[in-house]
Image: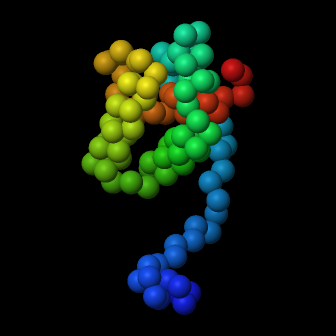
Amino acid sequence: KRLGDVLADTLVIRESQPLAYRGELGAERQFNTLRTPRTLRLIRHRVSLEEREFLLALCLRAQKMSPAARYDLMEEVAKTYREKLDIDDASISGENLVRDLTAVLFSRMR
């Protein structure tokens, strides 16, 4: 602990490896319902850089979460983006929506 951490009663946690996107997000899904011209335009204009980084971090770390925690978090995040991007497709799960959105944001072909 550093002196400031002792005084503030906090703990610093460092990850040994930074997050690195390897292009596998959304690779297993054949059809991404978010790839419509209207939705792509909304994604480009309404999703900030900080949000993009958050979504990438969430998807990369999802496998390390317990199933219940992952489900709850993905559903909450998906709810936010359903509203923000006017997505009415109730058939897509929260996790698939988050993963598809992240795949759109970080795909090489836009």
Q: Nearer the viewer, residue 31 or 107?
A: 107
Q: Quadrant of residue 91?
A: top left
Image spot of residue 77 (x, y percent): 39, 38
Q: Locate the C terminus by quadrant.
A: top right
Q: Is residue 14 left or right of residue 6?
A: right
**Total number of numbered labels?**
0
Q: Is residue 27 visible?
A: no
Image spot of residue 43 (x, y percent): 56, 23
Q: Nearer the viewer, residue 64 or 87?
A: 87
The residue at the far top in this view is 37
Q: Residue at x 52, y 73 (%)?
A: 13
Image spot of residue 105 (x, y percent): 61, 30
Q: Is residue 67 left or right of residue 26?
A: left
Image spot of residue 45 (x, y percent): 60, 24
Q: Is residue 34 left or right of residue 45?
A: left
Q: Is residue 40 left or right of residue 79?
A: right
Vertical relation: 5 (above or below) 92: below
